[in-house]
Amino acid sequence: MPEPEAAIGVICKAPRVGASKTRLIPALGPEFAAQLSRCFLIDLAASIEAVATDIHAKGYMVFAPAEAEAELRAFMPTSFGALCQQHAGLGTVLARSTQDLLDAGHDCVLLVNGDSPTLPASLMTEAILALRQPGERVVFGPALDGGYYLIGLKRAHLYLFEEIAWSTPQVLAQSIQRANLHQLPVVRLAPWYDVDEAQSLDWLRKEILGEKLPFLDRIGSPAQATRALLQSLNPGLQTLQADGVR
């Protein structure tokens, strides 16, 4: 029997000037914000490749529109598969991606946001190991903004993506309520954070500088591409604050 293979899909957009990290544009400018988005994906992909080395898994780019594939292929690992999801609404994208990757023969699926460049590989490994235990469950990686940075499933429980107020602080709570309603056991990973506005950018700056963030229980991934880009501000990395670049 072949070894089971997990799928790890990154929900990503092609990093385009003026359309990437729009909430960071006032602080960083459109070109730097797009570069930062690109580095986030590079670093997250590196962590996924580390997981694939330790525990049988395959990375995927989950993206739209179709023409974005060529832009992403320019810097994402050649080992990654491509899954175009041209659907309206995040819930539909997550539901269809889960179903499609399970239909492709993977034993379980993780869907990860593309906004957490220091997300430790260990959290993704924990999620896969939890899913490979007997019995049904959903694995959530709680984000500090009330959403989740990761969802893991081994069956497509599509009700988890229905009746959710996406892009609000209620996402995780509502998703857990949906799971409880259907008596689906929930596994919660340690929290992590998305970088999509000034305060979380400051958290990233502090983490890159080696500060231990009190709300995290472990050291993040090296995020070498993001680190190099932020350090290229020189000495801007030292002066980035939650209210923007001074």
Image (cartoon, grey):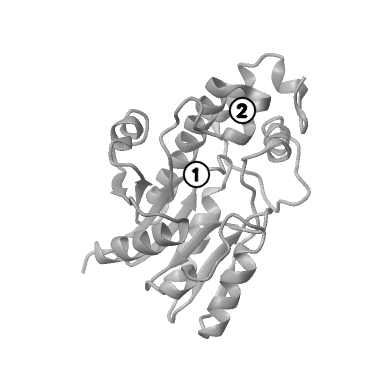
**Picture residue at 43% right of the left edge, 48% below the top:** 10
Vertical relation: 45 (above or below) 4 = above
Q: Nearer the viewer, residue 92 or 122?
A: 92
Q: Which mark is residue 170?
A: none
Element class at badge 1: loop
Q: Quadrant of the N terminus?
A: bottom left
Circle 2 crowding by C-alpha within 10 Å: few under 14, some 14–19, many from 20: many
Q: How far apart are the two marked residues, 1 and 2, measured between alpha carbons?
A: 17 Å
**Picture residue at 52% right of the left edge, 61% below the top:** 126
Farthest residue toward the left?
1
Q: Nearer the viewer, residue 176 or 123?
A: 176
Residue 82, position in %: x, y?
29, 46
Q: Amino acid at mark 2?
A: Ile
**Picture residue at 66% right of the left edge, 26% below the top:** 26
| Residue carrying label 2 | 25
Q: Nearer the viewer, residue 165 or 142?
A: 165
Q: Quadrant of the C terminus?
A: top right
Taking 190 as reference, is 157 left or right?
left
Residue 165, position in %: x, y?
58, 63
**Picture residue at 25% right of the left edge, 66% below the top:** 103
Q: Amino acid at mark 1?
A: Gly
| Residue carrying label 1 | 114
Element class at badge 2: helix
Vertical relation: 205 (above or below) 235 = below
Residue 146, position in %: x, y?
66, 58
Q: Earlier in the sequence, mark 1 or mark 2?
A: 2
Dividing the picture into quadrants, the one containing residue 87 is bottom left
Dividing the picture into quadrants, the one containing residue 42 is top left
Farthest residue toward the top?
234
Taking 229 as reference, is 245 left or right?
right
Q: Nearer the viewer, residue 238 or 82?
A: 82
Vertical relation: 2 (above or below) 208 = below
